[in-house]
Image (cartoon, rainbow, N blue to C red):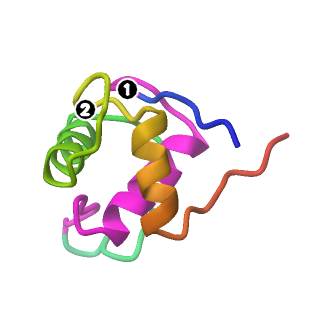
Amino acid sequence: MHFPTLRMGDRGPWVRTLKLALVDLGFYWHNTVAGEANQMPNDEFDYICNVAVRDLQMTKNIPAKELGVCDEATWRFLEQHTRLQIPQEG
């Protein structure tokens, strides 16, 4: 499977997939505002997501080409350590 490279400013279902995987591993917390705890993460690769990806890469020694960018090596780690919810094409 080919995974997209994601960076700050990107949007879409793959970003939501990334955020859910980061939540599973304890690197991302979303919707901490009262009353929003049960909502799904949004589809925007924002600063908080960037920091979470960077922290994951540094903590788990993932050989990323650029810290904070979700590249192939980062996706492979997530694939092995989480249950990725692959977006449906189309």
The residue depicted at 30 percent of the width and 68 percent of the height is 25
Report if residue 41 is visible in the image: no
Q: Quadrant of the N terminus?
A: top right
The residue depicted at 14 percent of the width and 53 percent of the height is 59
Camera-side residue of 65 and 11: 65
* Residue 64 percent coordinates (x, y): 31, 32
Q: Please state which amino acid type lies under the numbered disc 1.
A: Arg
48 to 9, vertically: above or below: below
The CA span between labels 2 and 1 is 7 Å
The residue depicted at 31 percent of the width and 74 percent of the height is 37
Q: Please state which amino acid type lies under the numbered disc 2.
A: Gly
Q: Mark 1 and mark 2 in contact (Cβ < 8 Å)?
A: yes
Q: Quadrant of the C terminus?
A: top right
Which image quarter: residue 60?
bottom left
Chain part drawn in magenta:
7-33
Mark identifier at residue 68: 2
* Residue 28 percent coordinates (x, y): 25, 58
Q: Secondary structure at mark 2?
A: loop
Left or right side of 19 for 29:
left
16 to 29, vertically: above or below: above
Q: Secondary structure at mark 1?
A: loop
The residue depicted at 54 percent of the width and 70 percent of the height is 83
Asked whether 36 falls inside the magenta stretch, the response is: no
Asked whether 15 falls inside the magenta stretch, the response is: yes
Name the residue carrying label 1.
7
Classed neighbour count for the residue bearing mark 2: other residues with Cα under 10 Å, few (<14), some (14–19), many (≥20):
many
Decide which of tag 2 and tag 1 comes sooner along the chain.
1
Which image quarter: residue 10?
top left
